[in-house]
Amino acid sequence: MGQRPYPGPLDAVPVPDPSVEAGRRFRPVKGEVPSPINPPSGCMFHPRCPIAVASCSRIRPDPREVRAGHWVACGEVC
């Protein structure tokens, strides 16, 4: 299991240590936040996901457990 496929939101969480936070590079998530009223078809994250494939725009993946207590809802994560 490698890195999470959609790291942007978690990378935006501040680190409580000011010396660590000062050295972090700002990495904004590209694209627009999906509308909760009119979400995109398929996976809600596909418009902004760096590993999205064509099927992501059509199929909303079901959550599945990839290891004990660790669930994902992504067809591209093994």
Image (tube, helix red, strand yellow):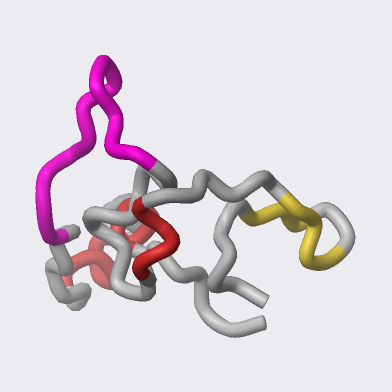
Residue 23 vs residue 78, the one in the foreground: 78
Residue 9 vs residue 71, the one in the foreground: 71
Reply above or below: 17 against 25: above
Which residue: 56% across, 59% down? 74
Q: Quadrant of the N terminus?
A: bottom right
Reply above or below: 59 against 15: above
Is 46 situated left or right of 31 in this image?
Answer: right
Reply above or below: 34 against 46: above
Residue 22 vs residue 24, the one in the foreground: 24
**Residue that lies at the very extreme toward the bottom in this rendered image:** 2
Q: Is residue 22 magenta?
A: no
For the stretch drawn in magenta, the main secondary structure is loop
In the rendered image, residue 30, in percent from the top left (x then y), is placed at 13, 60
Which residue: 23% across, 54% down? 47
On the question of residue 16 being in view, the answer is no
Q: Which residues are magenta?
A: 30-41
Which residue: 25% across, 61% down? 18
Q: Is residue 38 magenta?
A: yes
In the rendered image, residue 20, in percent from the top left (x then y), is placed at 29, 71
On the question of residue 47 being in view, the answer is yes
Is 42 situated left or right of 27 in this image?
Answer: right
Which residue: 45% across, 70% down? 5
In the rendered image, residue 4, in percent from the top left (x then y), is placed at 51, 70
Is 63 situated left or right of 46 in this image?
Answer: right
Q: What is the tally of numbered marks visible in this picture?
A: 0
**Residue that lies at the very extreme toward the top in this rendered image:** 37
Q: Quadrant of the C terminus?
A: bottom right
Residue 49 vs residue 1, the one in the foreground: 49
In the rendered image, residue 41, in percent from the top left (x then y), is placed at 34, 39
